[in-house]
């Protein structure tokens, strides 16, 4: 990973009428880094990604993407960026090799046939290269989409929820490929809803209602939240959750498998709130707050602040 910044933007803002979809976001991503971009639906992730790759013009803000000015250098940025959209956006009545050849033509890739062959080989698509895209499973469509957005040899990949609807093995294989490419110097900004994927990123950025709420490594994001969490097991956890919700000091009581995670930002107030319930048959133990605890906490805080 390099110390050079592939993305270095400040104050990035986009408005649609009265709606401010992205509200003065600062973000720095180093070359060769995998940055996870997280937030609830409608938080502004896709809009921000589209501004970075030159598909939308910011209303405010400044900075660089791959050394090019994000306001005036959008055409040059587009040539150096690969963008993988949420939905499969290739031609289902064309084969894998035909799709890749078409994309290579659009980018005016030199030595097009060699680039297509190399891309197919690199992502293990050889045995299926003649297969129609519409006949592929979700995992193979994902590989085709990744191959297509890399056909012009970009320096930065912007991936918008790339593993939605893909089975666990295909997701794991995809992330192994991402880490291999990052080790070769490729930079990634990846929007995802999956906490296990977020934990595989070098750094994270979390936005809600267009604002950047936290940014850093997984351990930095968790530490910055200053969240205390207790895990409780036993019978009737749903009833217990209902009793705990809304008590002073309790910010969330959320089911995690066969346990309940009870969290709050004030450790003393939380302990006082749960004290009357720390009786048999329930077993309580304090645990380290996880990434999911933190993001639920951030979502709840954002919702609470919006109501106020």
Image: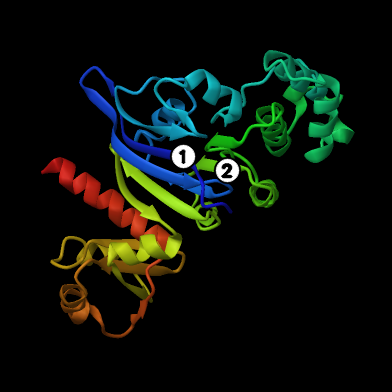
* Residue shown at 54% from the left, 35% from the top: 158
Q: Quadrant of residue 15 in the image?
A: top left
Crowdedness of circle 1 by 10 Å Cα count: few (<14), some, many (20+)?
many
Q: Which of 261 and 207 is in front in this view?
A: 207
* Residue shown at 65% from the left, 29% from the top: 149
Q: Nearer the viewer, residue 129 or 236?
A: 129
Residue linked to disc 2: 187
* Residue 210 in view: no
Q: What element carries label 2?
A: strand
Q: Quadrant of residue 221 in the image?
A: bottom left
* Residue shown at 71% from the left, 15% from the top: 108
Q: Are marks 1 and 2 in contact (CB under 8 Å)?
A: yes
Q: Position of residue 112 (x, y in %)?
A: 81, 20
For the C terminus, give its image quadrant.
top left
**For residue 275, above or below residue 180:** below
Q: Nearer the viewer, residue 277 or 120?
A: 120
Q: What element carries label 1?
A: strand
Residue linked to disc 1: 7
Name the residue furthest left: 308
Q: Where is residue 26 in the image (x, y as percent from the top left)?
A: 33, 41
Q: Position of residue 62 (x, y in %)?
A: 34, 31
Q: Is residue 65 left or right of residue 121?
A: left
Q: Which of marks 1 and 2 is nearer the N terminus?
A: 1
* Residue shown at 53% from the left, 54% from the top: 201
**For residue 153, above or below residue 307:** above
Crowdedness of circle 2 by 10 Å Cα count: few (<14), some, many (20+)?
many
Q: Where is residue 297 in the image (x, y as percent from the top left)?
A: 29, 56
Applied colour scheme: rainbow
C-alpha separation, residue under disc 1 versus residue under disc 2 = 9 Å
């Amino acid at each position: 990973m390099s110390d050079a910044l592939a993305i270095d933007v400040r104050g990035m803002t986009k408005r649609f009428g009265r709606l401010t979809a992205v509200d003065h976001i600062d973000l720095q991503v180093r070359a060769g880094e995998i940055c996870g971009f997280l937030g609830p639906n409608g938080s502004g992730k896709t809009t921000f990604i589209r501004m970075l790759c030159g598909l939308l013009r910011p209303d405010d803000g400044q900075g660089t993407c791959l050394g090019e000015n994000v306001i005036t250098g959008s055409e040059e940025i587009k040539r150096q960026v690969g963008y993988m959209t949420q939905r499969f956006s290739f031609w289902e009545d064309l084969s894998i090799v035909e799709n890749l050849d078409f994309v290579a033509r659009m980018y005016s890739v030199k030595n097009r046939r060699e680039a297509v062959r190399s891309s197919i080989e690199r992502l293990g698509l050889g045995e299926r290269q003649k297969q129609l895209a519409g006949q592929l499973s979700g995992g193979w469509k994902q590989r085709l989409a990744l191959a297509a957005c890399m056909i012009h040899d970009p320096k930065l990949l912007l991936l918008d929820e790339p593993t939605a609807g893909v089975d666990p093995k295909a997701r794991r294989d995809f992330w192994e490929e991402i880490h291999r490419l990052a080790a070769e110097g490729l930079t990634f900004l990846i929007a995802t809803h999956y906490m296990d994927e977020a934990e595989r990123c070098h750094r994270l950025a979390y936005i809600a209602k267009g604002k950047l709420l936290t940014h850093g490594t997984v351990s930095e994001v968790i530490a910055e939240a200053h969240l205390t969490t207790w895990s409780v097991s036993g019978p009737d956890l749903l009833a217990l959750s209902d009793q705990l919700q809304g008590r002073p000091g309790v910010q969330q009581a959320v089911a995690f498998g066969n346990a309940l995670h009870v969290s709050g930002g004030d450790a003393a107030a939380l302990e006082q709130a749960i004290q009357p319930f720390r009786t048999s048959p329930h077993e309580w133990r304090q645990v380290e707050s996880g990434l999911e605890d933190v993001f639920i906490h951030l979502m709840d805080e954002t919702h609470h602040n919006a109501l106020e």
